[in-house]
Structures are given as structure tokens and as C-alpha cells.
């Protein structure tokens, strides 16, 4: 029963959501809408559990004084402070919560992304080594696209920006759509496996 009941619930809920996409009858649409509302509520509780889990792990690290425990302590202090300000003062525009978000979180986020640019450049250098025909093609196309995005590219060849746009809109878009179609088919197959009870990893079993 520990397995059969969750699988049965997943089957009924999954089939109801799938049928509601093709049968717009109120008998199907109304329960599906209620189920979507339940999903939003469950997601909210999942966020609460996630925050509580982060706080628990961080407090344990601070208590044990393990590696980088100072950062965990700063995380807990910031978490409690932002939550307290949000609950007591609200999150209206121009308030203390909004000020802390714009003047503390946003600059730190920008700093993280600026540091990430160096890692991306390092990864691109390793990926663009012309060790094969495919890598050489990738290198040539990347150089052309980068030149077409800067003013010096137009100085070298006036038609380079238009050629760059063609690369992005035709071959790049074709590859992108192929990847999206593959990802969609993978998501559909995984969903069907969960609905039919073939995939049961969400139950904590193999």
C-alpha cells in the first residue's frame, strides 16, 4: 500500500491534467483548475521546507565550526533579517526590504555574474580548440558571430552584422529547436512513465 496508493494518485492526477488539455468540458476543467491551485500551495510549502532545511544545515555548520562556517553564519543572519523585515515592514516599493534587495542583493548578484564571465571565457577557450572538424567549425562561427556583434566587425565587412543575424536566426535557431524538441520529448516520456507507474524514483525507491 505504501507504493500502490501514491502511484494511483499520480496516475489519476496526471491523466486528469492531460485530458484537461484536450477536453475543455467543465467536468474536467474545474477539477484540473483546483488541482493546479493545490500544486501552487504545495510549491509554497516546498519553498518553506527548503528554507528551513538550509537554515538547519547552516546552523549545524556554525555550531560545529567546520570549514567556511562564517559564510553559513552570514547566510543565516541575512535570511533571518530579510524575512523579519519582509514580515514586519512589508515588501512594498521604496520600503526597507526593497532597499536591501536593490542595494545589497542586486550588487552581490552582479558581482557573481561578473566572476562567472571569467569561468565562461576559460571554458570557451578549452571548447574552441580546433582538434576536429566540428571544433574548427565551432571556432570559426563563434569568431564570426563575436565580430558581427561589435563595431569593428562592420568596419571589416559591412555585411558582417547581417550575416551574423542570419547565422543566429537560421542554423543556430534550427539547432536550438532540435534541442528543445528533444527536451520536450524527454519530458513527455518521463511524465508518461511517472503516470503509468514505471518511474517511481519520486517515491524514494529505484
Image: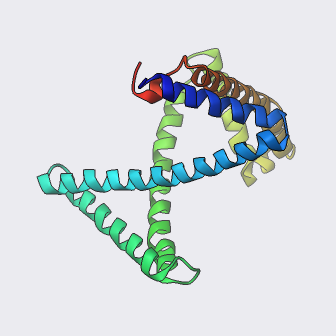
The reply, left or right, for residue 51 in relation to residue 102 is left
Say above or below: 111 vs 128: below
Q: Residue at x 52, y 49 (%)?
A: 42
Specify whether residue 160 is in view. Answer: no
- Count of all numbered marks drawn on residues in the image: 0
Quadrant in which the C terminus is drawn: top left
Query: Which quadrant holds the N terminus?
Result: top left
Q: Position of residue 30 (x, y in %)?
A: 75, 47
In the visual, does 51 lie left or right of 131?
A: left
The residue closer to the viewer here, 88 or 15, is 15
Q: Quadrant of residue 70?
A: bottom left
Q: Within the image, what quadrant is residue 100 found in?
A: bottom left
Query: Horizontally, is 88 left or right of 190 in the view?
Result: left
Pinpoint residue 8: horizontal percent, then vertical percent: 56, 26
Q: How is the image coloured?
A: rainbow
Residue in the foreground of this view, choosing between 93 and 129: 93
Q: Is residue 100 above or below residue 186?
A: below
* Residue situated furthest left in the rendering: 64
Q: Nearer the viewer, residue 114 or 4?
A: 4
Q: Position of residue 149 (x, y in %)?
A: 73, 49
In the rendered image, is residue 10 in sight?
Answer: yes
Which residue is found at the position 36% from the left and 65% from the top? 79
Rendered location of residue 105, percent (x, y): 46, 67
Indicate whether 131 appears above or below 162: above
Name the residue located 50 percent from the left edge and 61 percent from the top edge. 110
Which residue occupies the foreground of this view, 132 or 98?
Answer: 98
Residue 197 sits in which quadrant?
A: top right
Amino acid at each position: 500500500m505504501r507504493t500502490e496508493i501514491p502511484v494511483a494518485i499520480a496516475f489519476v492526477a496526471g491523466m486528469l491534467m492531460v485530458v484537461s488539455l484536450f477536453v475543455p468540458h467543465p467536468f474536467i476543467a474545474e477539477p484540473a483548475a483546483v488541482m493546479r491551485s493545490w500544486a501552487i500551495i504545495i510549491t509554497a510549502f516546498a519553498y518553506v521546507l527548503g528554507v528551513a532545511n538550509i537554515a538547519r544545515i547552516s546552523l549545524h555548520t556554525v555550531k560545529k565550526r567546520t570549514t567556511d562556517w562564517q559564510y553559513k553564519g552570514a547566510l543565516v543572519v541575512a535570511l533571518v533579517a530579510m524575512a523579519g523585515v519582509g514580515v514586519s515592514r512589508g515588501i512594498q516599493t521604496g520600503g526597507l526590504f526593497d532597499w536591501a534587495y536593490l542595494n545589497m542583493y542586486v550588487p552581490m548578484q552582479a558581482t557573481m555574474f561578473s566572476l562567472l564571465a571569467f569561468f565562461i571565457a576559460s571554458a570557451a577557450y578549452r571548447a574552441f580548440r580546433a582538434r576536429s572538424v566540428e571544433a574548427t567549425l565551432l571556432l570559426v562561427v563563434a569568431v564570426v558571430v563575436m565580430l558581427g556583434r561589435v563595431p569593428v566587425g562592420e568596419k571589416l565587412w559591412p555585411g558582417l552584422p547581417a550575416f551574423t543575424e542570419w547565422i543566429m536566426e537560421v542554423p543556430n535557431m534550427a539547432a536550438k529547436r532540435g534541442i528543445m524538441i528533444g527536451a520536450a520529448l524527454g519530458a513527455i516520456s518521463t511524465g508518461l512513465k511517472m503516470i503509468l507507474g514505471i518511474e517511481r524514483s519520486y517515491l524514494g525507491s529505484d
